[in-house]
Amino acid sequence: PAGGVLGRPVSMLDIAPTVLDAAGAASHPGFEGSSLIGITAADADARPAITQWQGNRSVRWRKWRYTTYPSGGEELYDLSLDPSECTNLSSDPAYASILTILQAKLG
């Protein structure tokens, strides 16, 4: 919403394209992100925020964060209930369906 709060995670890669869009300038073709101007919750859900560092991969989607490590380890957090990421839910069978969704989003 214009001038409002989206309430969904977005990628830092979207900042530069958004600033250029707000200024009425064309985006640089080398930018990976997209402008956030006019984004909807459905748009944000279709573009989860993915981070990669030193072989680790993490996706932030809706209220969830899922991270994988080259060693095979993984972490899953419900950030609405556990914003400090203290309780890893990845091995809890009750979260198997969300784990599958987030694994697919990481590709």
Image (tube, helix red, strand yellow):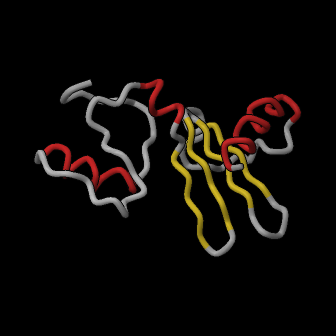
Horizontal and vertical percent position of residue 57: 65, 60
Q: Is residue 11 left or right of residue 49?
A: left
Residue at 33 percent across and 59 percent down: it is 29
Which image quadrant for residue 62?
A: top right
Quarter of the image for the N terminus: give it: top left
Judge by depth and name the residue closer to the eye, 54 or 34: 34
Residue at 59 percent across and 70 percent down: it is 53
Which image quadrant for residue 83?
A: top right
Judge by depth and name the residue closer to the eye, 55 or 20: 20
Judge by depth and name the residue closer to the eye, 29 or 19: 29
Task: Give the answer, above or below, for where 46 lies relative to 71.
Answer: above
Residue at 77 percent across and 55 percent down: it is 74
Furthest residue toward left: 23
Q: Is residue 100 left or right of residue 14?
A: right
Horizontal and vertical percent position of residue 43: 45, 29
Task: Give the answer, above or below, for where 22 lies relative to 17.
Answer: above
Q: Is residue 64 left or right of residue 5?
A: right
Horizontal and vertical percent position of residue 52: 59, 64
Horizontal and vertical percent position of residue 106: 68, 49
Task: Give the answer, above or below, for where 95 lies relative to 17.
Answer: above
